[in-house]
Structure formats: structure tokens, C-alpha cells
Amino acid sequence: MHNFTAHLTECQNVLFKLNEHKSNIVILGTHYDSRAKATKDPVLTNRDSPVPGANDGASGSAVLIELARVLYDQRANLACQIWFLFFDAEDQGRDNAYGIDGWDWCEGSQEFVSEINNFYNSATETLDCMILLDMVGGESLRFINEQYSTSSLLDELFAIGRQLGFTSQFPSNPDSASIIDDHRAFINNGTPSADLIINFWNNPEWSYHHTTQDDINHISNSSLDVTGKTVEQFMHNNYNNDPNNQYQGDFPWNEDINVIDNETKITIVVVIAFAGVIVVILIVSRGVSKEKNKLIEGKNLLSTS
């Protein structure tokens, strides 16, 4: 357990370790808290109610618990130590005028990383990577190209998902955005990290973010299965001791190439369009001025004659 106090509130991150005798570490993370107030609920009277958090919190936790069961049975063949890390205090930041006073998003992961040296020996152990699962259980699952993530690690997860046949969940042309989430503290600490997360801010297929409708009725067993199988295959591909395993992953996942996110693309298009309009106006204005000058010159010639 990792106990900490956030703004006078007692909180607790939960950590389980598998294969502690191995020297290289893979962190599988999620948050288990849910938002205290449903600040996006379409019914105004519901906005003081807590969010059930079936997708935003519980889905990632459910997948991690099942992965712990599955990977425990495979532990003898896995050449790494695995941390199953559940964060508290992720979801109470400022949104629609609500937020617990002074709180930021992702308090739990920031607190954990600030004390991470208490949980491993950096002289003999190495943090290989961190994979975060957030909102992975909703209907019509489609992961985005999250831009804070280490691109080589996220690209490998996408490639594995697609190889498993999950092409709609790991689209070839995904939405792109930079999401403040629990993986950022690990990125800032130098650990390659990836966030498996959906478009939750503008998604008619899953429109329940921070509402009272984020409940079990909008959870898909298929989405949970897709997420779990993809991460399990990633572990098998990169850390299975089987000498017949010829898979070549992107380890050590150092390459990080960002793409332009969707909002920036829209902004660029708008700016280019606006600039184009200005250029057209200037060209037309210049043409009108030339014609006007010609008319004035013609009148002057008539007056002189």
C-alpha cells in the first residue's frame, strides 16, 4: 500500500508485485477512484451526485485484476517483474466550476512517482515501461493516439491489437489528443509510458463521461476482453522465455514522435482558410483599385483634351 495525504484527505494507492525476483519491471496501471460530482450530467439536478465510474475507473481496474489472474499462471515463463498499480485521487480536478479545493488531476500517480524509489532498487532494478488503462470498457471502444505517450510503445500496442483482429478498436487513423492522465508522471520521470484511452470529450458513441450514466449498463464485455487480450499478448511477445518466440518488439521504447492532434489540425485549417480569404480580399481590392485608377486617368485625359 502507498498511503498519502492530499489536501487533508487520506488517500491510498494500491500496488501488487508479481515475479519480484526479476530485475526489469513492467508497470500496468489504472485509477480506481471515481468523480465525486457528475459535473457533465445533462440533468442539472444530477450534477451534485457522484459518478458511478463503471468505465472511468472500474473498467481499467477490472482488466488489471483479470490480467493479474492470467499472468500469475504464466509467471514462470515471464522474464520480468510486473507491477499492478491502482491509483487513488485521479479524478477530482477542476471541471465545470467544480473541483475539490486545491486539487489537481492525477494526484495519486504524482504522489507515487515522487516516492517511487521506496518501491524498487534503482541500482539493481529497471523500470522498462508503464501501460495505463483508462476508460477501456465502454461500448464502441476506439482507442486514440494519445500524444503524451511514448509513441514507440503506443504504436506497438496498436500493432498488436490489430494483429489480434481488433481493427475497429485500434483504428489505422485514430483521433489524436494530449490527455492529462496518470502516465504523465512516469513520462516525466523518464519511464516509457503509454495511455490506452478513448475520445471521451466528443464521442456520441460513449457520451457518459462524468455523468451519472457511467454505469454498468454502458459497459461492454467485448471491450474489456479486447483490452485485456492486447496487453496479455504484449507481455507474451516481449517477455516470454520461450526460445521459439521470434517476435521483435520496440524495446526499449525510446522513440517518441508526436503528431498534430485533432484540435490543432482544426486550428491550422481555420487559420489557413482565414488567411486565404484575406489574400483573396487583398487581390480583389487591388484589382478594384487598378480599375478605379484607370477610370480616373481616363477622366483626366478627357478633361485635358
Image: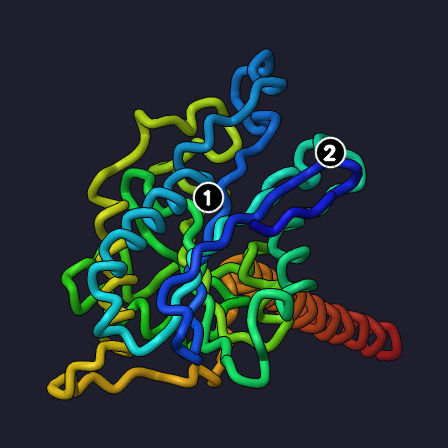
Could you say where residue 168 lies in the image, as x and y percent from the top left?
23, 55
Judge left or right: residue 194 versus residue 4.
left
Q: Earlier in the sequence, mark 2 or mark 1?
A: 2
For this rendering, which residue is in front, 93 or 283? 93
Residue at image point 26% right, 45% down? 223
User: Label 2 is placed on what type of residue?
Assistant: Ile
Judge left or right: residue 284 versus residue 42.
right
Judge left or right: residue 105 versus residue 220.
right
Judged from the image, the secondary structure of the residue bearing numbered disc 2 is loop
Q: Residues within 10 Å of mark 1 (few under 14, many from 20)?
A: some
Q: Give the residue number, with chain letter if any, for mark 2.
A: 100
Residue at image point 26% right, 59% down? 72
For this rendering, which residue is in front, 109 or 243? 243
Whether residue 265 is situated above or below residue 252 in the rendered picture: above
Could you say where residue 26 lies in the image, as x and y percent from the top left?
42, 70
Q: Residue furthest left?
A: 244
Q: Residues within 10 Å of mark 2 (few under 14, many from 20)?
A: few
Q: Quadrant of the C terminus?
A: bottom right
Whether residue 167 is situated above or below residue 159 in the rendered picture: above
